[in-house]
Amino acid sequence: PSVRVEEKDLNGYSITLAESDEMAQQRAVLEWIFNYEKLSGEPVLNSNDMLENLQANLPDFHVVDMTGITLYDALTMISDGIPLVVKNSEGTWCVAEGYVNGYIVIADPKDGTVSGYEQDSAVNGIASSGNVIYSYYK
């Protein structure tokens, strides 16, 4: 990963409201990815594990576990047009979908919002949940 990234917003704009139900959060994140990648069908949740669900629902992609690196270092994926699946400071599965003007754009199914957070705040929030970050590539 590079520390210099090109700013980009993937413009997901919305995410399904899932509140505190972790499986509903996973479904909302997968639905966001299905919409973004223009995949047909509905996500299937065969596991409680988000990584396993990503692998099962994205068989034509290479799913990557980047857990342990910082969100800042993972931003290169967004620069390349690929969202990040992250666990935020509240333990919610979210989509990091943009990085613009010093803000990181997060689609959060817990409250069904897409919001920009100051970079340091977002990086520290993801770090507080163990830097759990997944992504994929074609």
Image (cartoon, rainbow, N blue to C red):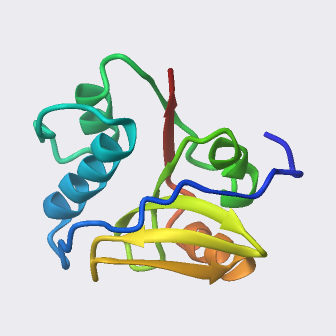
Residue at 40% across, 79% down: 90
Residue at 81% across, 51% down: 6
* Whether residue 26 is situated above or below residue 34 in the rendered picture: below
Location of residue 101 (image quadrant): bottom right
Place of residue 130 in the rendered image (x, y in percent of width and height, measured from the top left): 54, 62
Which part of the image, by quadrant, shows the N terminus?
top right
Place of residue 131 in the rendered image (x, y in percent of width and height, measured from the top left): 57, 58
* Whether residue 92 is situated above or below residue 98 in the rendered picture: below
Query: In this rendering, would 40 be left or right of 69?
Result: left
Query: In this rendering, would 75 be left or right of 10?
Result: right
Residue at 62% across, 75% down: 122
Place of residue 63 in the rendered image (x, y in percent of width and height, measured from the top left): 44, 28
* Whether residue 65 is situated above or below residue 60 in the rendered picture: below
Place of residue 19 in the rendered image (x, y in percent of width and height, measured from the top left): 19, 79
* Whether residue 97 is situated above or below residue 54 in the rendered picture: below
Location of residue 94 (image quadrant): bottom left
Q: Nearer the viewer, residue 11 or 92?
A: 11
Q: Residue furthest right?
A: 4
Q: How many marks?
A: 0
Residue at 29% across, 71% down: 109
Location of residue 12 (image quadrant): bottom left
Query: In this rendering, would 105 be left or right of 119?
Result: left
